[in-house]
Amino acid sequence: MIASGTMPGEALKAEKMPGHWLLARLGKRVLRPGGRPLTYRMIEALNIGPTDAVIEFAPGLGETARLTLSKKPASYTAVERDKDAAALVQKLLQGPERRCVVGLAEETGLPDASATVVYGEAMLSMQTPQQKSRIVREAYRLLRPGGRYGIHELCLIPNDLAETTKLEIQNDLSTVIHHGTRPLTIAEWQGLLEAEGFSVQTEAQAPMHLLEPWRIIQDEGLFGALRFAFNFLCNRDARRRVLGMRRVFHRYRDHLAAVVFVAQKQEAGPQ
């Protein structure tokens, strides 16, 4: 369960709300494209320990924050642009060196070289190409030399997917999610990281099965899945939106996947 408080996007009607907050309103807590298994893979590859200073971009409802905090890092700072989401995450954080600040991932205001680990999930895919680069560049600035940066994002497959198909998928996703959605191919994600001074150490992929019943049970547990199903069935407008998202995911199931990268900051910096 998440801490009580105002849910992000609560003032919006179901037909206008961004898709990730609509799913959260219905009780879905895991909003990452590869689900819990790919998040676990990212956290494992980041190898967080008691000497690490961790910064998380866009923690959402704080599900990955819980996993990170179980590793007992020296410090944890979340940067969340939505004040309601930030307030919910802050309620999960107890003790010194644990905080959630309201801010932008591309311009956090945090000191240079203040982290050994930075990560973000399901947020770069929502950005323009320029914003993607700015956010990755900010992660580079925040990390000490040799620091680790993890991303968990939606991706397009295969790498040689036609540009017309990419554009079609991006447009259809943006229409049903009510938020600009611009996933990259695996090669493009890696190229983005390398262009900003990172060396990829780990890559892992998973099918994009966010709204498949078995994945909902895997991510939310049986009780959580039943809660989501009840809310889904009781809200006609939300049900219409979710079914629309699921249809688009199915339509492009051969070209949508989830990917995790963990990369290391290189001392030489971007080329």
Image (cartoon, helix red, strand yellow):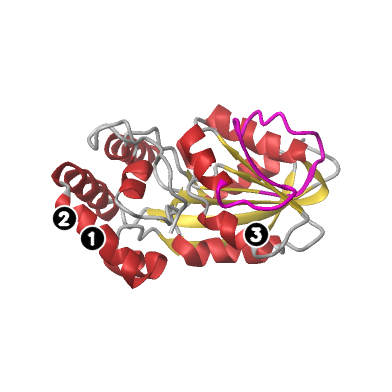
Residue 160 is left or right of residue 58, and the answer is left
Q: Earlier in the sequence, mark 3 or mark 1?
A: 3
- At x 56%, y 65%, the residue is 40
User: Mark 2 or mark 3, which is nearer the start of the sequence?
Assistant: 3
- Amino acid identity at mark 3: Leu
Identify residue type, mark 2: Leu
The span from disc 3 to disc 1 (Cα, nearest Å) is 29 Å
Q: Which residue is mark 3?
A: 69
Amino acid type, mark 1: Ala
User: What is the C-alpha distance between the residues marked 2 and 1?
Assistant: 6 Å
Instruction: Look at mark 2 in the image and give the residue it sits on.
Output: 233
Residue 216, compared with residue 236, is above or below; it is below
Which element carries disc 2, helix, strand or loop?
helix
Residue 94 part of the magenta-drawn span? yes
Query: Are dots 2 and 1 in contact, CB under 8 Å?
Result: yes
Left or right relative to 109: residue 204: left
The residue that mark 1 highlights is 229
Confirm whether residue 79 shows in the render. Answer: yes
**Bounds of the magenta span?**
91-118
Is 121 or 157 nearer to us in this picture?
A: 121
